[in-house]
Image: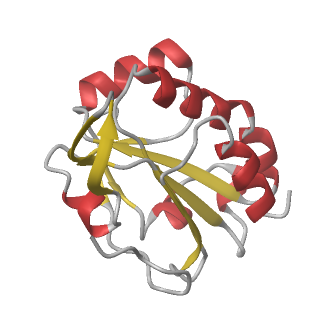
Amino acid sequence: MEHLRTGHPAPALCLLDQRGEPFDLAEHPRRDAAEYRRRDDARTVVYFFAGAFTPECTTQACDLRKNLAWLKGAGVGVVGVSGDDPQTLAEFDQRHGLPYPLLSDPDHAAARAWGAWGTRTVDGRTSDGPLRATFVVGPDRSLQALYYRVDPATHANWLMRELGL
């Protein structure tokens, strides 16, 4: 698997969100009416997670929710991506009050394009599957920061450090 690098253009990201509505990352900063999206220096955090309701993914999603005020204040939006269907993502959102888009990537094409799919070991078994990965996309659509094989326990700290918060 080829990992992306900082400075590379962000791959396309056009998927259905948890409401079943189309979401296009290229239009996101201009489409979203939220205050943090009106800034010229707006950035977007795109994070890939293995699946809704798993303990580590829940920890990661809720930690981002907890830090969303800081992120919004710095002009940073958040978008989560997994292989779950929109209905499952809607249930995950409702249960945990996640105030950001969750995108459905059922064929894992986006995960592969972003380098968030590859060999992993879960419970001692090695297989190909989703990799926890996070990207910071700048206003020019370039990748400003990336973090592969994210540790949910330190994810928000890494992100805040990378964003200078």
- Quadrant holding the C terminus: bottom right
Q: Is residue 99 visible?
A: yes
In this view, the residue farthest toward the left is 107
Relative depth, front residue between 139 and 65? 65
Residue 162 shown left or right of residue 92 in the figure: right
Q: Quadrant of residue 87?
A: top left
Q: Is residue 17 above or below residue 59?
A: below
| Residue at position x 81%, y 45% in the image | 70
Q: Quadrant of residue 65?
A: top right
In this view, the residue farthest toward the right is 165
Residue 83 shown left or right of residue 136 in the figure: left
Q: Position of residue 124 (x, y in %)?
A: 31, 32
In this view, the residue farthest toward the front is 124
Q: Is residue 55 above or below residue 49?
A: above
| Residue at position x 34%, y 66% in the image | 115
Q: Position of residue 143 (x, y in %)?
A: 54, 76
Count of marks, rendered view:
0
Q: Is residue 16 visible?
A: no
- Quadrant holding the N terminus: bottom left
Colouring convention used in this rendered image of the protein? secondary structure
Q: Is residue 156 above or below residue 85?
A: below
Relative depth, front residue between 47 and 2? 2
| Residue at position x 27%, y 68% in the image | 113
Residue 114 shown left or right of residue 59 in the figure: left
Q: Position of residue 12 (x, y in %)?
A: 32, 71
| Residue at position x 41%, y 21% in the image | 92
In this view, the residue farthest toward the top is 95
Q: Quadrant of residue 99?
A: top right
Q: Is residue 11 above or below residue 130?
A: below
